[in-house]
Image (cartoon, rainbow, N blue to C red):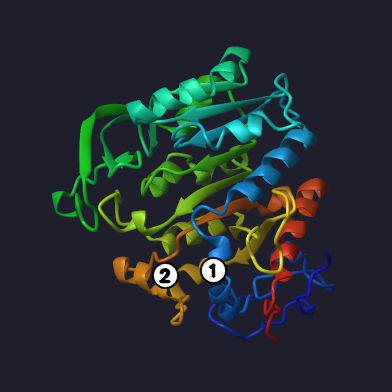
Amino acid sequence: MRSRGVQIPNGRVVKCCAICVASVGAASASPLWMSRDIDERALCTHLGVFGQDRDQAVAYNMYRERMLRGSAAGRAHFFVVGTHDGRDIEPVVSAPWWNVSNGVVHGWEILDSNYARAEARLASHIRLGDVELSHRGVSSQRGSMRRKSVGLSGEGGFLDPDPLSQTQGLSKVHSFSPIEVVAWADVLRELSIAEVSYSLVDTEGHEPLVLRGMALRQSANAFPAFQFEVATTWCDGRRVGAHTQHDVALNLEGFGYVLFLMGDLRGHSVHLGMDVADSAALLPVNASAFATARCPDNKVFQAQAAICPQGSPFSSNVLAILKSQLAAHRSLRTTVETMVAAWRSLPNTATQQ
């Protein structure tokens, strides 16, 4: 599918909704992945497509593209920070395009029960050597932090050092003993890994500090593409620190990344029956979207905004890709543009002029 977006001459600023930005393309139309002139009303209408648990299809395509493209540095290294019970790793290492000799997934999990379930679920792959699990946490620096789980779901995280926010908006918070944490950039040096081919970060509110530990200002090229969860966990009792979604998105743009909300069209009325590879959808966004989007008619969004009055209301997963990687790799551009075109295929998503 081709873009239904508007072709914008070089240097022209298009004024539309709160999520619009200037086009920075060449003299011809901007690449589809560079288009940021998204109608906020369309975003709010289809917000459910980009929900917190709708990232699997996009992740599948990103893993597949990177695996099939190969790694100039040899074996491709993938990371899942917040492995839970292994459910995000199993589809990748079981896929028909997965090659045990060309890739390895490093899984990190802090809760004992989740780690045990992941070990059992991925036992055959651990024996083959294409999955390596670590019972440690990832943060902004090396040390130890006190773990917690929330309710009966097995969601883990780290306790905010501020006691006033320990249980804000939460119930049934269970605290566990401290566990070792490391900074991601330090791990790469220890393992002599020059590049993380793709990674998933789902750490129940600790994502900003995980990203800080990546040292992206100095080492962005080591993380060409990754996803991270954004949710009300960034502002309830699971939060560690005062970072907002807008703060993090603004920093990532400054480091050379373009950002997308990750979605899945399966279940949408006009896309029933799609398989996982074809159902992936990407919505290009800029940092200001995380500060200015309002969605006044979306009850779920408004409930989340009430929990996060400081401006972190999205519950989704964000894909960050270095612009330089998109410019350098045709297969990556094609993969991304196909998923953006899938978003454009939904009703009422045409851009405003």
Q: Name the residue carrying label 1.
A: 47
Left or right side of 206 for 64? right
Left or right side of 146 for 206? right
Left or right side of 21 for 238? left
Label 1 neighbour load within 10 Å: few <14, some 14-19, many 20+: some
Q: Position of residue 86 (x, y in %)?
A: 50, 31
273 is higher (above) or lower (below) than 62? below
Residue 181 makes an appearance in the image: no
Residue 104 makes an appearance in the image: yes
Determine which quarter of the picture holds residue 198: top right
293 is higher (above) or lower (below) than 304? below
Q: Position of residue 193 (x, y in %)?
A: 59, 26
Decide: marks 1, 2 in contact (CB < 8 A)?
yes
Amino acid type at mark 2? Val
Q: Name the residue carrying label 2.
A: 300
Q: Which mark is residue 326?
A: none
Label 2 neighbour load within 10 Å: few <14, some 14-19, many 20+: some
Quadrant occupied by the N terminus: bottom right
Amino acid type at mark 1? Leu
Q: Mark 1 or mark 2: which comes first in sequence? A: 1
Quadrant occupied by the C terminus: bottom right
Helix, strand or loop at mark 2: helix
